[in-house]
Image (cartoon, grey):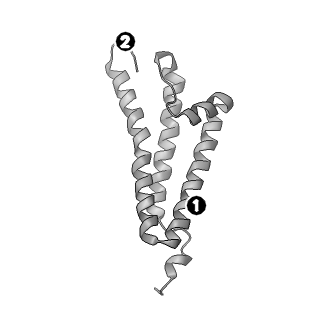
Amino acid sequence: MNTPGAVHRRPVLYPDQYAWFVLFSALDIILTHTILEYFFDFGGREANTIADWVIRQYGMWGAIGLKFLTVVAVVVLCEVIGRLSPHAGRRLARVIVMLSTLPVAWALILLARFAMTPHGVL
């Protein structure tokens, strides 16, 4: 049954984008943990100032909590904007997914660079 306004009764507006966002957010946490845990002595550090402070204060569990809160806030923001303007909400969700790939790509570049250097310098 496809009635006008049915889009407003779906549980979430952009489930595919949210799944990608959650995936890249989880990869960000995993790669951050890997770099900090195993490569700290070689210069591995958190580049995000807020996340760095959270990690220093609360450890990786704090970083996981921060990431979880960020994911929830982004999904809520996309839902609110998407219910006001479906086009703007969809665009925001897509941009968020694209942006969430950047820290993952950067971490993978750092790890590849580490693997290829004889001295192990990030």
- Kindly identify the amino acid type of the residue bearing the numbered disc 1: Val
Q: Residue at x 31, y 21 (%)?
A: 116
How many residues crowd around disc 2 within 10 Å: few (fewer than 14), some, or many (20 or more)?
A: few
Choose between 115 and 47: the one closer to the eye.
47
Give the x, y percent position of residue 113.
34, 24
43 versus 109 height, above or below: above
Q: Residue at x 41, y 62 (%)?
A: 91
Q: Residue at x 52, y 66 (%)?
A: 81
- Kindly identify the amino acid type of the residue bearing the numbered disc 2: His
Residue labelled with disc 2: 119
Q: Is residue 111 left or right of residue 8?
A: left
Q: Quadrant of the C terminus?
A: top left
Q: CA distance from mark 2 to mark 1?
A: 45 Å
61 versus 101 height, above or below: above
How many residues crowd around disc 1 within 10 Å: few (fewer than 14), some, or many (20 or more)?
A: few
Examine the image and state in which quarter residue 119 appears: top left
